[in-house]
Amino acid sequence: MTKIIMHGCNGAMGQMITGLVAADEDAEIVAGVDINTEQKNDFPVFASIDECTVEADAVIDFSHISCVENLLNWCEEKQMPVVLCTTGMTDEMLKKVEEVSKKTAVLKSANMSLGINMLLKILKEATSVLAPAGFDIEIVEKHHRRKLDAPSGTALALADSINEELNNEYEYVFDRSQRREQRPKKEIGIAAVRGGTIVGDHDIIFAGEDEVITFSHTAYSRAVFGKGAIQAAKFLKGKQPGLYNMSHVIDQ
């Protein structure tokens, strides 16, 4: 049984994960943290992680960027494993994540979906074959109208996975509207679509001479991210300090 503290328990993702854990025989949420301390479930809720005295095996964080630094400090002090799902971290915060990972297990991923993380691995093999054969690479991502950032962190992670296989020699291009020239070979185009209630849709296009290969992932519900976070929390239980990602969960 993995005992979990849900950081951001009263948000949409926090409540979704709470429901998923309730149906999981191998996990239990023992405490929640949220600036809204309304007790919606049968575990205690604290306004700040500093107030939490409940013993647990890991923290799942789906909160707000303003709360993450304090959470990291607490996890470092308590040597508490943490699954970081909050997005939008600055370079300074990412450095802090690396520092904390020297004292406790930290799992951070741009996307918690098991499907996306399997796709990250598949793309490396595809890139090693298709890029040398002259295939151009484009990524199109689609999300709901309320999403603030573009391109998505997942789209960038997909591009990074491809580019790592190409010795990071390719340039990311987000807008071609001011350019009148043929498409250079060593670039990865990344386009963002925003509209409606699209949860998350990513297409990776390898366009060659007379043929196109497309890898696609569609999230129909945010539950895919919650399920991945729970799997990650189970994985971190008892792990040594270090910086982990979802590929470690898939490969275990």
Image (tube, grey):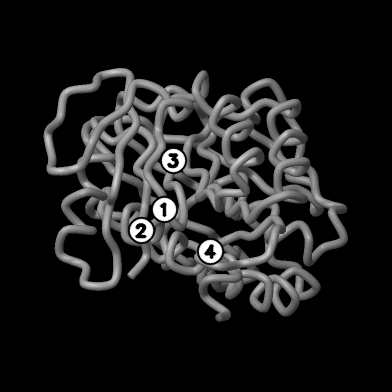
Of marks 4 and 1, the one in the foreground: 1
- Residue kind at label 4, given as amino acid type: Leu
Q: Is residue 163 above or below residue 180?
A: below
Of marks 4 and 2, the one in the foreground: 2
Q: Secondary structure at mark 1?
A: loop
Marks 2/1 in contact by CB < 8 Å: the verdict is yes
Q: Secondary structure at mark 4?
A: helix
Residue 101 percent coordinates (x, y) = 71, 49
Q: Quadrant of the C terminus?
A: bottom right
Marks 4/2 in contact by CB < 8 Å: the verdict is no
- Residue kind at label 3, given as amino acid type: Asp
CA neighbours of label 1 inside 10 A, class few (<14), some (14 to 19), many (20+): some
Residue 139 percent coordinates (x, y) = 55, 50
Q: CA distance from mark 4 to mark 1?
A: 12 Å
- Residue kind at label 2, given as amino acid type: Lys
Give the mark nearer the N terminus: 1 vs 3. Answer: 1
Residue hosting label 4: 236
Residue hosting label 1: 56
Q: Which residue is found at the position 36% from the left and 30% from the top?
A: 194
Residue hosting label 3: 61
Residue hosting label 2: 3
